[in-house]
Amino acid sequence: MTSSHARGRRPAGSDTKAEIMAAARRRFSEMGYPRTTMRAIAADAGVDPRLITHFFGSKQQLFASVVELPFDPGTVFPMLLAGGDEEVGRRLAEFVLGILENPQSRNIVTGIIRAAASEEAAAAQIRDRVVVRILMPLARQLGSDRPELRAALVGSQVVGLTFARHVIGVPALQTAERSELVAFLAQVFDVYLRGTLDHEAD
Amino acid sequence: MTSSHARGRRPAGSDTKAEIMAAARRRFSEMGYPRTTMRAIAADAGVDPRLITHFFGSKQQLFASVVELPFDPGTVFPMLLAGGDEEVGRRLAEFVLGILENPQSRNIVTGIIRAAASEEAAAAQIRDRVVVRILMPLARQLGSDRPELRAALVGSQVVGLTFARHVIGVPALQTAERSELVAFLAQVFDVYLRGTLDHEAD
C-alpha cells in the first residue's frame, strides 16, 4: 500500500520512462543490440518513438542508460579471486566464457561494445560504468602493484575476445574448443593478475 | 603519355569512383572515423553525396572498402618473428604500441573497429580482410600447433587494447607508461605464440 501510494506521487512521466526502460532492457537482451529498433521498444512500451528520443536521445544512449551487467562484480570478483592463486586465471577464464556462452548475457556484452564503438556520448557513459562497476571492484581484489592497470588489461582482453569472436566473427575463435580457450586465457589472466613488471630491469 | 591514353579509355565513372576513394582514405586517416562525414568526402571529391551512397552504400561500407592497413603484414610479421624466440613477444608488443602511438595509423585501426561494430555488412568485409591479410600471414610464421587460433588470440588482444584505450578511453590504460604496457603485452603475446596447450593434461 505504501508503495502504491508513493507510486501515485511520482512526477508525471516517471512511469512511462520506467516502462520504456523495461521494454528496452528486454529487447536488447533478447534480440541483441543491432536488431533492436527504437520503434519496437516504443510499441512494447505503448509510446510514441519520439518520446524515447526526447527522454534518452539516440539508441546508443538509450542502451547505455538501461544496460545492466549480467553479473554483480562486487559479489563475483571476490569469489573468483578467493581461491588458490594458481587457480585464479583459470577460474576467471571459465567465468568469462560462461558469460559469452549464454545468449542473453552475450547480447548484453556485445551490445555494450557496439554502443561504445558508435558514439562518443555512449562511450563516455560506458567508460564511467565499466571503470566504477567492473575495473575498480576487480582492482580492489588485487594485492599486486598497479591494480588499476592490471584490471584494465584483463578487461581489454575480455573486450577483445568478445569483439573478435562475436562481433567480427573470426572463425578460428568460433571453432576453438572451450578447453583450448580456457588454457590460453587462464595463462594470460595469470600474467595480468600476478605477473611481474620487470621493465625497470635493464 | 601511355598512362594518360589508358586513362581516357577507362569506363565512365571509374575516375570519379577512384577520386571518392582517395578522398575517403585521406579524410578517414586524418580525421578518424567518427568525425569524417560523407558530405565532406563528397565535397573533397567534387561529387554529389548521393553518388557515394550509390557506389558504396553506407559510411561503414565505404570505410571497409577503402581502408588500407597501416603496415604490410606479409613483410612485417616475418621480420618481427625472425628474431630470437625470447624476444618475439616484446618485439610484437613494441610494434603494436608504435602503430597506436602514431595518430594516423591509430585512426585507421580504431576506424576498422568502429566500422566492424556498427554494421553486419562492414563486419563481414572486415573479418575477411583481417583473416586473410593479418591472421593468416601471422599464423604462417608460427611453427606451433594451432597457428590460426594463436594468431586470432593475439589479434583479439590487440583489438581489445585498442578498444579499451582509444575507443572507450579507460584512464588506467591511457596513463600507463609505455614500458609497463610493453612488459605485460610481451608476456601475453609470448603465451599466445609459444605457450603450451596443456588442457588435455587432466
Image: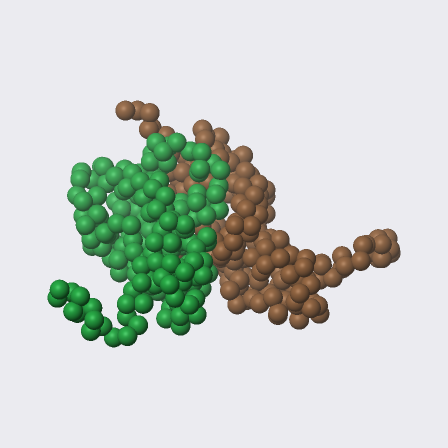
Chain colours: A brown, B green
The quarter of the rendered structure image containing the N terminus of chain B is bottom left
| In the foreground, A64 or B62 | B62
- Between A77 and B11, the one lying in front of the other is B11
Residue at left 76%, top 57%? A14
Q: Quadrant of residue A194?
A: top left
Residue B24 in percent (x, y) is at 36, 58
In percent of width and height, residue B188 lies at 33, 41
Q: Nearer the viewer, residue B92 or B41?
A: B41
- Left or right of A7 in this view: A133: left
Residue placed at 45% from the left, 61% from the top? B39
Q: Is residue A49 visible?
A: yes
- A20 left or right, relative to B63: right
The image shows residue B103 at horizontal and vertical percentages of 36, 43
Up-down relation of residue A31 to residue B90 (above or below): below
Instruction: Single out the residue that lies furthest toward the left.
Output: B2
Identify the residue at horizontal 64%, vertical 57% (top origin): A56
Residue B122 rendering spot, x and y as whole percentages: 39, 64
Q: Is residue A160 above or below residue B7?
A: above
Instruction: Name the residue at 46% across, 40% down.
Output: A152
Residue A72 lies left or right of residue B103; in this view the side is: right
Q: Residue furthest top?
A: A201
Q: How many marks?
A: 0
Residue A172 in sight in this render: no
